[in-house]
Image (cartoon, rainbow, N blue to C red):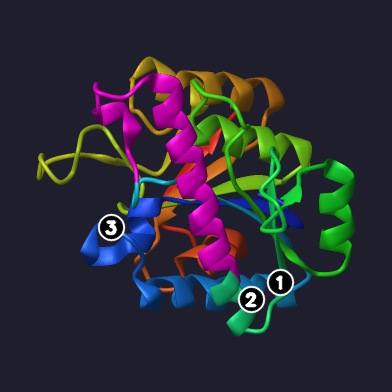
Amino acid sequence: MEKLNRVLLKLSGEALAGDKKTGFDEETVVGVAKQVKVLVNQGISVGIVIGGGNFWRGRTSEKIDRTKADAIGMLATVMNCIYVSEIFRTEGMMTQVLTPFECGSFTKLFSKDRVNKYFSKGMVCFFAGGIGHPYFSTDVGMVLRAIEIEADCILGAKAIDGVYDSDPNKNPDAKKFDKLSISEVVDKKLGVIDLAASVLLMENKIPMKIFGLNEENSIINAVTGEFTGTVIETV
């Protein structure tokens, strides 16, 4: 893969929670910040999308209207981005949180021009709130923002170290893939990202790398080439 100048990093909320499974594990978040700072110091522009699963998984509840459940999920991602953004600042980076809807003075409204201005100043941009509408997952928000900011690659940091043919936590014989096409991901129903996000990825030909957040220097390695996760190609 060619040198990456601009990346979209997707962090799962569960991965940021560490062993606690909910809320934040500060040591984990500081570790992420230190790795991203290495990339920023190399002149790489970094945009970040964070899932909300460490606070809310609305689709598991049938007692709440889907649109309201998705609204809570979007706000969970805003909380995550504000928290992680502040940890990044303590590590010496400049940051901004952008949302597709007004959040008072907490965030800025997303626009490509605004993001490019922040990137030109060496800032890390956090994209919170999904796309601002229900029925669209954080996966869709991730791919959409990657397309809009013209990212060279999406980096998917998860609680497991790549894509497997079955759940490695349940099947000790699960096979890990080194490389897949997005078509294979859909055909094999591997559940890496949802179908709507997969179609967007396929149409816009943005490669994706899936890896374990808890592995040492995994984010840096995903960019520098010392990569042990799964590459998802779109050609």
**Amino acid on which the number 2 mark rests in the picture:** Lys
Magenta includes 66?
Answer: yes
| 70 up-or-down from 153: above or below | above
Tell me the kind of residue under disc 1: Val
Residue in the image at 39% along x and 72% along y: 28
Residue linked to disc 2:
37
Given the current orientation, which residue lies at the most extreme front position? Answer: 104
Figure quadrant of residue 154: top right
The answer to whether 12 appears left or right of 166 in the picture is: right
Q: Which mark is residue 50?
A: none
Quadrant occupied by the C terminus:
top right
Q: Can I make out residue 235 in this image?
A: no
Is residue 44 toward the left or the right of residue 164 in the image? right
Q: Is residue 108 magenta?
A: no
Q: Residue at x 61, y 27 (%)?
A: 201
Crowding near pointer 1: few (<14 within 10 Å), some, many (20+)?
some
Which residue is under mark 1?
A: 40
Q: Nearer the viewer, mark 1 or mark 3?
A: 3
Looking at the magenta stretch, what is its main secondary structure?
A: helix
Asked which secondary structure carries label 3, the reply is loop
Residue drawn 67% across the image and 53% down it: 7
Question: If you read the primary sequence from the N terminus, does the residue marked by circle 3 or circle 2 appear first?
Answer: 3
Mark 3 crowd level (few <14, some 14–19, many ≥20, 10 Å Cα):
some
Q: Looking at this view, is 183 or 142 the one in front?
A: 142
Label 1, secondary structure: give it: helix
Q: Residue beneath label 3, please? A: 22
- The mark that comes first in sequence, 1 or 3, is 3
